Amino acid sequence: MIITRATEYAIRAILHMSRQPAGEIVYKKDICKAQDITPAFLTKILQPLIKDGIVGSQRGVGGGFYLAKPPVEITLLDIIKSQEGPVYLNQCMIEDGAACEREFFCPVHGAWEQIRKEFMATLSRYDFATLAAEQGCHLPVSPSSTKQH
């Protein structure tokens, strides 16, 4: 499984917003510049996040985007599900009522089910408050922040 570029950029945008003060509106141009995302693509990838209540938007002068939830309540799984839909590793895991005809005698079915559960649990453990704090520890120090006053 490879996540789409949209999902990758959505994660980067949420990480950027998670590093801002709580409730602060972040301008589209600032997210685009910091994360190297085109404005049109940013708008496209944020739409599902707005629909899912993860991101909010404010229009007009001074408008932009903000996190609708605290970063500690947003996980990697939330962003992946918002962008990609439900997480399935293969066809036999799809829960639309069309179960795999081999489900009851296929030894791999149980393995896929357990792997999927563990994968989703792992993604759920990574919240954006933790990721943002981790990123802050690894950011390069800019020359202006090291000047003596």
Image: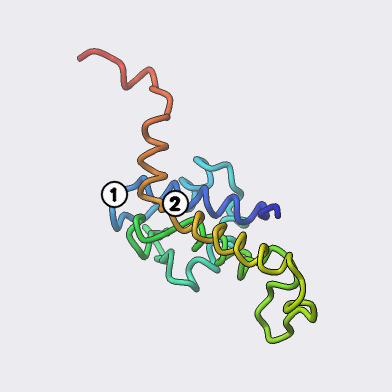
Near mark 2 (Cα within 10 A), the count class, few <14, some 14-19 or many ≥20, is some
Which residue occupies the extreme top position in the image? 148
Near mark 1 (Cα within 10 A), the count class, few <14, some 14-19 or many ≥20, is few
Question: Which residue is at a point 63% across and 67% down the rendered structure image?
Answer: 113
Dot 1 or dot 2, earlier in sequence: 1
Viewer-proximal residue, 137 or 33? Answer: 137
Q: Is residue 70 left or right of residue 11?
A: left
Amino acid carrying label 2: it is Tyr
Amino acid carrying label 1: it is Pro
Q: Is residue 73 left or right of residue 5?
A: left
Q: Does 131 sit above or below residue 59? A: above
Q: Does 146 sit above or below residue 135? A: above
Q: Does 55 sit above or below residue 22? A: below
Q: Quadrant of residue 86?
A: bottom right
Viewer-proximal residue, 58 or 125? Answer: 125
Residue 35 placement (x, y as % from top left): 53, 43
Residue 55 placement (x, y as % from top left): 43, 64
Residue under label 1: 21
Q: Is residue 83 left or right of residue 73?
A: right
Distance of mark 1 from mark 2, alpha carbons? 20 Å
Viewer-proximal residue, 88 or 127? Answer: 88
Question: Which residue is at a point 39% across and 22% down the rendered structure image?
Answer: 142
- The N terminus, quarter of image: bottom right
Question: Which residue is at a point 55% across and 68% down the rendered structure image?
Answer: 48
- The C terminus, quarter of image: top left
Residue under label 2: 126
Q: Does 146 sit above or below residue 28? A: above
Residue 105 placement (x, y as % from top left): 76, 76
Which residue occupies the extreme right position in the image? 101
Tally of numbered discs = 2
